[in-house]
Image (cartoon, rainbow, N blue to C red):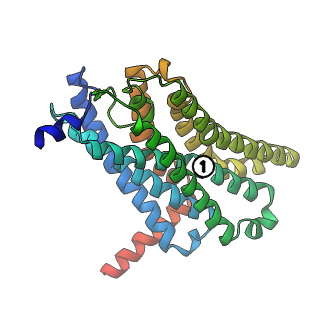
Amino acid sequence: MNNSSAKDDFVLVGFSDQPKLEKILFVVVLISYLLTLVGNTIIILISSVDPKLKTPMYFFLTHLSLVDLCFTTSIVPQLLWNLRGPAKTITALGCAVQLYVSLALGSTECVLLAVMAFDRYAAVCKPLHYAAVMNPRLCRALAGAAWLSGVGNTLIQSTVTLWLPRCGHRWLHHFFCEVPSMIKLACVDIHANEVQLFIASLVLLLLPLALILMSYGHIVKAVMRIKSVQAWRKALGTCGSHLLVVSLFYGTITAVYIRPNSSYAHMHGKFISLFYTVVTPTLNPLIYTLRNKDVKGALGRLFHKDRDLGS
């Protein structure tokens, strides 16, 4: 029975062709993961308990932090285990779970970033009606739509991918179970799967990106009409963090999912995936906190309250 189950396991080749690099990556990935856990947990905590952060922006930021926490946790523990020694296997069940969960969360983040761009558009272009436009009911509906789109995409994409016959192929040239690399294991014509993946990528990557660009196009027009340096600074302060997060996330994930599978370079693709699965979830909390007076103030109030309780 053990031999049978071992035959069904996948081998995550990852970075095993560069053993010296694996040792460095283990340290970098471990530190990044710990920072991700701490940073995103702090954002979720302060957004939940601080009354001054009970706004649509921080409501969506809480969801983004939750997505990043779960997304990186679905991948990094297995990656660390594989980086620390020669054993590179993952069970068939573990691979399936990782595939479903990581794709669901990645897709959710794509839509969630578009929702956050709409929130910024409402804040800058409709300031007098912002509270009415971004009411709690709409915020919950938009966040729910983001989560449902991620679940729907993974149910289709992951299921179709796992149904492909592999004819005993189990060497995955990646560090986690991801659709583009899983498709490569199939022993049948995968052209239809490549087309399906491309269409899904257009819908869940490029469509949200187009909505983000439209939102910021309207924001730029609104600010240019005011012709005020102060208005530019306020808009940049309101939208700068989100724009940077969008650039980091979309700049890397589109490079993996928009390209045809045949051009998916092994090492190049792995490092791109490493960036958006490990580095981006670490940077997001820093981007949203370093220049954010609201978050800094909430942190100060939280720690001040803790000190008062302690004394």
Q: Residue furthest left?
A: 2
Estimate how packed mark 1 is, as few (under 14), some (14 to 19) or many (20 or more) residues with alpha carbons within 10 Å: many
Amino acid tagged 1? Val
Q: Quadrant of residue 158?
A: top left
Q: Quadrant of residue 205?
A: top right
Q: Nearer the viewer, residue 176 or 70?
A: 176
Image coords of residue 201 (percent x, y): 58, 36
**Residue at (65, 40) in percent of width and height:** 209
Q: Give SS at disc 1.
A: helix
Q: Is 135 located above or below residue 65 in the figure? A: below
Q: Mark 1 = which residue?
A: 111
Q: Across the whole image, how many numbered discs are drawn on residues?
A: 1
Q: Quadrant of residue 70?
A: bottom left
In the image, is 31 to the left or to the right of 181?
Answer: left
In the image, is 162 to the left or to the right of 222?
Answer: left
Q: Is 47 located above or below residue 92 in the figure? A: below
**Residue at (88, 46) in percent of width and height:** 225
